Amino acid sequence: MAKKSVASLQKGGGKEYTKVIITTKSPKTGAYTFKESMVHNDNVKDVLAAANK
């Protein structure tokens, strides 16, 4: 199934998107959590700037 999803992202406008993974550390437990999202290439800097605030 993974091959189908990757192949479908590379057809048409799929190359215009980037997978962004944001890591956050919990102040209470010290454990790391990850938030993944698919973001249009034009908005990557905006998403990362909002995550760092």
Image: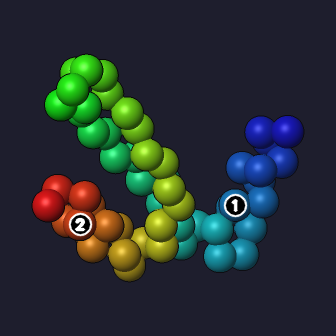
How much space separates mark 1 and mark 2, taking CA atoms?
25 Å
Q: Please, which residue is most extreme toward the left here?
A: 53
Question: Could you say whether the residue bearing mark 1 is in a helix, strand or loop?
Answer: helix
**Residue at 78% across / 60% down in the picture?**
8
Q: Which residue is mark 1?
A: 9
Q: Quadrant of residue 14?
A: bottom right
- Numbered mark located on residue 43 in the image: none
Give the residue number, with chain letter if any, for mark 2: 50
**In the image shown, does 41 or 36 lie closer to the viewer?**
36
In percent of width and height, residue 11 lies at: 74, 67
* Residue 46 against residue 6 in the figure, above or below: below
Q: Nearer the viewer, mark 1 or mark 2?
A: 2
Number of numbered discs visible in the structure rendering: 2
Relative placement, left or right, of 48 versus 27 is right
Seen at 65% across and 76% down, the residue is: 13
Q: Position of residue 19 (x, y in %)?
A: 49, 54
Q: Is residue 2 left or right of residue 23?
A: right
Which quadrant holds residue 24?
A: top left
Of residues 30 and 1, the one nearer the viewer is 30
Of callouts 1 and 2, the N-terminal one: 1
Label 1 Cα crowd, 10 Å radius (few <14 / some 14-19 / many 20+)? few
Q: Determine whether, in the image, residue 17 is placed left or right of residue 6.
A: left
